[in-house]
Image: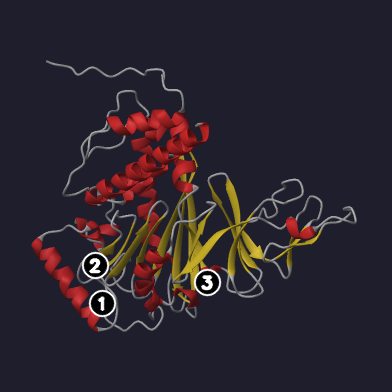
Amino acid sequence: MLVEAVPQAVSPTFATRSERVAAALADRPAGHSLPRPFYTDQEFYEVDIEQIWSKEWVFAGHSCEIPAPGDYFTMQVGPFGLIVVRGTDGVVRALHNVCRHRGFQVCSEPSGSKRRRFVCPYHQWSYDLDGTLAVARSMEPDFERSGYGLASAWCEDIGGMIFVCVADTAPDVAPMRAMIEPYLAPFDLRSAKVAFESTVVEAGNWKLVMENNRECFHCRTAHPELCASFPESPLHSGGGSDAELAEQQALVERCEALGLPSRYRSAVDFQYRVMRTSLLAPAVSMTPDGKRAVSHNLGALPDGNLGDVLCYHYPSLWSHFTADHAITFRMTPISVTETELRTCWLVPGDAVEGIDYDLANLTSVWLATNDQDRRLVEQTQRGVNSPAFRPGPYSATEEEGVIQFIDWYTKTIGERLAAADRLASDTDG
């Protein structure tokens, strides 16, 4: 019997981590998973943070979480701590959570409300809600406060969903807004409320978390609760059988006749996508019995089976919107083998727990599914950690969504590393 040799770990011979990543990208066979270092190596993870997470728009949360001036929540994007706050002018901003005096973290709570200002607990430098430095005690008479406000990050509200970017120059958000916002508008998310949120830390690399989400190849055996209502076919990435696609098209045409955008649309590089897909008949919502979870609909949505609007954006977001509630998932990396997943269930703002919805019925399917996915990701990470791991081929039929994600990731990383090399060469020259 021929036994294939397991490649042994080789000490890197490249001068920089960027060269190591570029060499690994060049060695990857098309249509295969990434080489092991992309999931296990600290230097590769640092490149991810620098070239992906520190340069892309990242889903932060919902505008309905901070409805009043002074309401805020905090979050982490790689090494960047942010405060997302609604100002006295009603504008939502993202401020770096770093005091301009000696670097103390201004806010340590996950969320809250400030009546007028943020006050650093260390030496009481105080900042208005727009980040302007208001008070800096015991400074010299000629100290100029205007140059020491909280640094700001880019922030955009798209259909009630807040995105942030910590780059010096953010990617153009207009194409994403133009595509996604019309699909979200009928749900009126700005008037919704978060009925429940769950945060879990998965012991796996962030790319394994996203890869797991981008296919339902595993759903039949792994997710019995979800498969009672959600189709396991690759409809969500543009595939599916003739019969499934026909059913999908019928739903799309019916909903668009009602004025609800529904057709499959995606960025050219598949970084973001939005569509409406059918649930398994007779399900109208993702609950244990497929029946609606909330007594009335979000926004001004009409009655009837409206399917499920799916929206994702790399690197951090995927989401589901049914007529009566919405579920959003925010993924952020913690370390090379740790990823935080925050899930929010949104219901109409006037819905009353225990009267209009039962919390267990609303959340049970995705609480179970998230835990099942966590175990899948963690067991994959344990396997990838082995020196015996080598990239395997994806199924073009069942894992098309994974291929799209990995192609976007490798293209983005490759282009940015090449641009950084050109800049370094020009500087040296």
**Lateral position of residue 417 relative to residue 92, left or right:** left
**Lateral position of residue 115 relative to residue 356, left or right:** right
Disc 1 residue crowd, few under 14, some 14–19, many 20+, Cα 10 Å:
some
Q: Amino acid at mark 1?
A: Asn
Q: Secondary structure at mark 1?
A: loop
For the residue pair 40 and 314, the one nearer the viewer reads as 314
Residue 112 placement: quadrant: bottom right
Comes first in the chain, label 2 or label 3: 3
Residue, disc 3: 64
Residue, disc 2: 279
Q: Residue furthest left?
A: 242
Q: Is residue 336 visible?
A: no
| In this view, the mark in front (1 or 3) | 3
Residue 390 placement: quadrant: top left
Q: Is residue 257 visible?
A: yes
Q: Amino acid at mark 3?
A: Cys
Between the residue at mark 1 and the residue at mark 3, the CA separation in whole angstroms equals 25 Å
Q: Amino acid at mark 2?
A: Leu
Residue, x 29% and y 78% (percent of image)? Answer: 260
